[in-house]
Image (cartoon, rainbow, N blue to C red):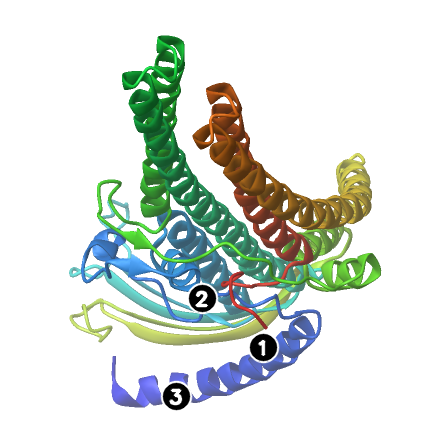
Amino acid sequence: MPKGIFHAALTPLLRMTMLCFCCLAALSAAASAAHNNAPPPLYKGDRPLDPQSSRHGRPSSFTMKEAVMRTLKFNPNLGAQESQSRSSEEGRKSARGAFGPRLGMSYAAMKQEQETSPVTAKPPEMGRYTFGVEISQPVFQGFKLLAAYQKAALQADSDKAALRKAELDTTEQVQRYFLDYLRQDENVVSAGDSLARLRDQLNITKAFYDVGLRPRLDVLQAEVNVSQAENQLVQAENSRDTCLAMLNTLLGLPATAKSAYVGKLFHVPFKLTLENCLEIAYRQRPDIYIASKAVEIAGKDQKAVQSDYYPQIEAYYNITNTGNSPDMQRVGQNGSRGTTWEVGAKATWNVFQWGTTWYADKQAGWLVTKMRYEEEQLKLDVGYDVKSKLLAVREAEKRISLAEKSVAQATEAFNAALARYREQVGTNFEVLDASSKLTAAQASLTGAKADYLTALAQIYVAMGEFHPDLLQVK
């Protein structure tokens, strides 16, 4: 293509391109006006692209906060959810590109043979070659492009909120298993203490039996209780190891990893009222945000359907060079060359389609109504969820104080029964019964503390708040 022709074609193309970009900026600004920021993900850094990267450089022990933060970074499910969110963001950018002009090029070579009588002008011997450049710009598409971009932007926001929801749910799951691990670990300690007490009692009973102060039945009862305590210890250790394997899995570690999870169960005050909790939940729960975006997305789908009511207008500009040589020059006796410029606009309008657009519009409208009802139902469910979680917190809090009294009373009762037995005024059954009740009271206290902290983790998630360390006193 000669330079003169190229420059002649380039100048109008540049003008058209500048005009198109001005239109793009105006439309993008209008589209961005409806684009709200989603709740940001909890994990600020990009997750590693390699799903197996969590196996390298892992620490040997974790506090609750360290366990949560590692899970947010390396959990494969969260990595998949982040990939979906980033994919939607790229889809938004792709939809934005539809506002801009399209530049197309074509090159064609044609060889033609004619047999006519009488002989007329013969076709060029080398054939005919054509090179064309066209730029087109959508001027008005019945708001379809704007609706498509806004829908993609809303979907990107919705997926970003979905990532935050997945992170909150995973945080609660990690904390629940972390607390369950601590519960089982304390149960192991309690079961070990119970076994030690029963073994001491067995030794005392045997000593009394050897000197003829106690019957053989007392020894047999003490041995049975020792065996039962050993069985309970094995079960507690197995439950602890199962929680350990689950925690490793959530953190993206092999189930066989020798990890240590460090923490103690204690009471952390929670002073928010039901009204405070509901206000926070309605303001920042990701699923409420997702539901509102679902309503807006359905509205944009309806806008896209309604675009068929309007004409579709597109502007274009093209330049075509022809010649009978590959470089579009005139060669030979029958050769020729030429350049054609064309600028224009075209409009198409489907005036009547037997109600296709009308009923599709009604269909999309009912889907919008459906989404609004689902959003309202979700708000009602959130109110119930928050209240039930708060009641669970208050219940576990009361159980802690009752269990502490029970442990103190059971400890005193066991010491009294043991002293009476040593003084030969009490029975072996009284000691074993007091030991069993002390073990049960200790397990009840441990369970109440773990249940309280678990309910605390759940109420925070129900409010949409991120608290990676429940064991931190504020």
- The Cα–Cα distance between marks 1 and 2, rounded to whole angstroms, is 34 Å
Q: What is the three-letter code of the residue carrying label 3?
A: Ala
Q: Position of residue 23 (x, y in %)?
A: 61, 79
What residue did someone put label 1 on?
24
**Precedes in sequence: disc 1 or disc 2:** 1
Label 3 vs label 2, nearer the camera: 2
Q: Which residue is mark 3?
A: 8
| Observer-nearest of 436 and 63 | 436
The answer, for residue 217, to whether it is visible in the render is yes
Category of crowding for the residue at label 1, using alpha-carbon neighbours closer than 10 angstroms: few (below 14), some (14–19), many (at least 20): many
Identify the secondary structure beneath mark 1. helix
Q: Is residue 201 above or below residue 324?
A: above
Query: Label 3's element?
Result: helix
Say if residue 121 shows up in the picture.
no
* Amino acid type indicated by mark 2: Tyr
Residue hosting label 2: 43
Give whichever of 187, 60 is nearer the camera. 187
Q: Earlier in the sequence, mark 3 or mark 2?
A: 3
Residue drawn where x is 23% and y is 69% of the image: 335
Residue 297's tag is: none
| Relative height, residue 50 to residue 363 (above, below) | below
Q: Which of labels 3 and 1 is toward the front?
A: 1
Q: Position of residue 396 (x, y in %)?
A: 67, 46
Residue mark closest to the camera, 1 vs 2: 2
Give the amino acid type for the residue marked by disc 1 in the picture: Leu
